[in-house]
Amino acid sequence: MINKSGRYLLGLVFSVMVTLGLLWSMQALIAGGKNVLTDAPRGNVLDFIRLKKEQQLVKKERKPQKPVKPKEPPPPMAQPKMQQSNPNANAVSTNFAANIETDIGLSNGLSLGSGDGDYLPIVKVAPIYPRRAQSRGIEGYAIVEFTVTANGSVQDPLIVESKPEGVFDRAAMDAALKFKYKPRVVDGVAMAVSGVRNKISFQIDG
């Protein structure tokens, strides 16, 4: 029979062997874990990526619309005409005698070079009939003398004759200041012409 001391010795040996076995197994596990972290995974890994279909952008190009061609060509521009505007046109007819024939400053037979020419009336505005003379039925005329400047305007109008005297003077001079002329041109240079006269008649429609 094994005595008491022998059993203690046997238990100590067994415990030492168990301890060594546990240490060895733990060492094996640690060594195997290192390989798990460093070794590449075995097998194939499939990555699924869902691709969207390519979208085609359709660009709409806006073309400028062509202007509509007129069916008929525009009418030619009218030449300047004599203007006769009168606020009292319904009751008054101003027999406007300020025509080219009455521009007594026009020179007949004036010899001028190419491109030159005497002054010519372009616009003549009818005068405003004085209300007092209209209400009293007074008719008459006024002869206005003035200067046609180099730019075709009228300057320094004055009355050289009127009948009845002083009745139509202001209306005649105001109208003359609105006249427009083509100036006289001599050797390519526009010149002023003085002493131009116009007779403006005032008549009431009966």
Image (spheres, rainbow, N blue to C red):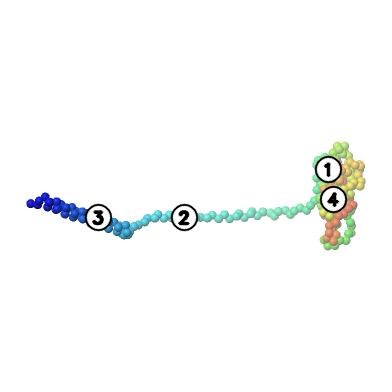
Q: Which residue is mark 1?
A: 128
SS under mark 4: strand
Does the residue at mark 1 contact the one at mark 4 (Cβ under 8 Å)?
Answer: no
79 or 113, nearer to the observer: 113
* Label 3 Cα crowd, 10 Å radius (few <14 / some 14-19 / many 20+): few
Give left or right: position of 34 versus 83: left
Question: x, y percentage for residue 52?
Answer: 43, 54
Give left or right: position of 161 versus 153: right
* Label 1 Cα crowd, 10 Å radius (few <14 / some 14-19 / many 20+): many
Q: Could you tell which of marks 1 and 4 lies nearer the N-terminus?
A: 1
Q: Which residue is mark 3?
A: 26
* Label 4 Cα crowd, 10 Å radius (few <14 / some 14-19 / many 20+): many
Residue at point 25%, 55% (across, down): 26
Q: CA distance from mark 3 to mark 1?
A: 131 Å
Q: Which residue is mark 2?
A: 55
SS under mark 1: loop
Q: Quadrant of residue 151?
A: bottom right
Q: Could you tell which of marks 4 and 2 lies nearer the N-terminus?
A: 2
Q: Could you tell which of marks 3 and 4 lies nearer the N-terminus?
A: 3
Question: x, y percentage for residue 49?
Answer: 39, 55
Q: Could you tell which of marks 1 and 2 lies nearer the N-terminus?
A: 2
Q: CA distance from mark 4 to mark 2?
A: 78 Å
Amino acid type at mark 1: Ile
Q: CA distance from mark 1 to mark 2?
A: 79 Å
Does the residue at mark 3 contact the one at mark 4 (Cβ under 8 Å)?
Answer: no
Q: Which residue is mark 4?
A: 154
Q: Quadrant of residue 29?
A: bottom left
**Residue 43 seen by the camera:** no
Q: CA distance from mark 1 to mark 4?
A: 18 Å
